[in-house]
Amino acid sequence: MEILDAPFVKAFVNLANDGYTHGYHERNGGNLTYWIEKEEIEQIACHFTPDNAWQEIGTEVPDLAGEYFMVTGTGRFFRHVKDDTINTCGIIEVDETGKRYRILWGYADGGRPTSELPTHLMNLEVKKKLNGGKTRVVYHCHPVNLIALTFVLPLTDAAFTKELWQFMTECPVIFPDGIGVLPWMVCGSKEIGIATSEKMKEYNAVVWSHHGIFVAGSTFDETFGLCHTIEKSAEIAIKVRSMSPTKLHTITRPMLRDLAAAFGLKLNEKFMR
């Protein structure tokens, strides 16, 4: 099978294009990583170039040793992923120590993986420890309305979770655990990777204040759907705040409990106080 014909590559490209068309990726903003299944690797391995030099990841992910990932490239534009996948994206392999990677395919014009690679791999490792490898996708983007809320809401998990739950009924259904929030931190640093990993022990979405959001999921659709839902609720919140300083109606805690009972959800109780 040609690499560009592989179903996971097509799904990867579709998510990148969806993010761009929704306005989540200005210039070279954002990044995406997919942890490739062994069976998928077997179908395309004949096209790899395994003699490329090993390079330092910038962190250690021993639980991902020997694994393969498709990753968007640093400095690359999401708007080009659909039509120029081989230059904007690549496939990498992590070595047996979990400290280095090598490029097997892609980045054809001399590129390399996103500068957020340490954060992506650290968070996939955290999720592997929690669910045995069910989480395969991590995605970072810059949704406008959510970023705007980081300038007016307290930068706490509770403030953002309660706000978003109360503005759209689907939110507690899509993210019943809530979402995490970090203060502003330098992007691409090991520190933001560590801080995000701590939040990912409890949530599948972490807001990076004045910057964007980092989300994780088991499939491309689940991951993008989580981000899309959060941003849509943030957009509603922004519009309501622009119309009136107070709300005449909202989704109350008793309503949230009714919703949880109807859908068999277990809402995070610390946000129900």
Image (cartoon, rainbow, N blue to C red):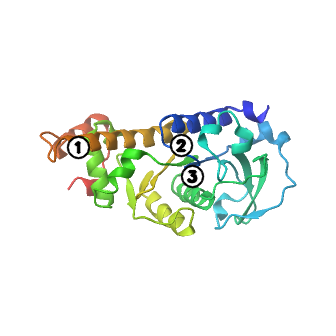
Q: Dot 1 lies on which element?
A: helix
Task: Give the mark toward the camera: 1 or 2.
Answer: 1
Tell me which residue sits at (31%, 35%) in the image.
263
Q: Residue furthest right?
A: 51
Nearer to me, 31 or 64: 31
**x then y, percent, for residue 30:** 55, 49
Q: Decide: few, some or many residues near mark 1? Use Cα within 10 Å; few <14, some 14-19, many ≥20.
A: few
Q: Specify whether residue 178 is in view.
A: no
Residue position for label 2:
218
138, above or below 258, in the image: below
Q: Dot 2 lies on which element?
A: loop
Are the residues flagged by discs 1 and 3 in contact, CB closer than 8 Å?
Answer: no
Q: CA distance from mark 1 to mark 2?
A: 36 Å
89, above or below 123, in the image: above
Nearer to me, 271 or 52: 52
In the visual, does 45 lie left or right of 205?
Answer: right
Residue position for label 3:
132
Nearer to me, 219 or 132: 219
Q: Earlier in the sequence, mark 3 or mark 2?
A: 3
Q: Amino acid at mark 1?
A: Ser
Nearer to me, 101 or 65: 101
Residue position for label 1:
242
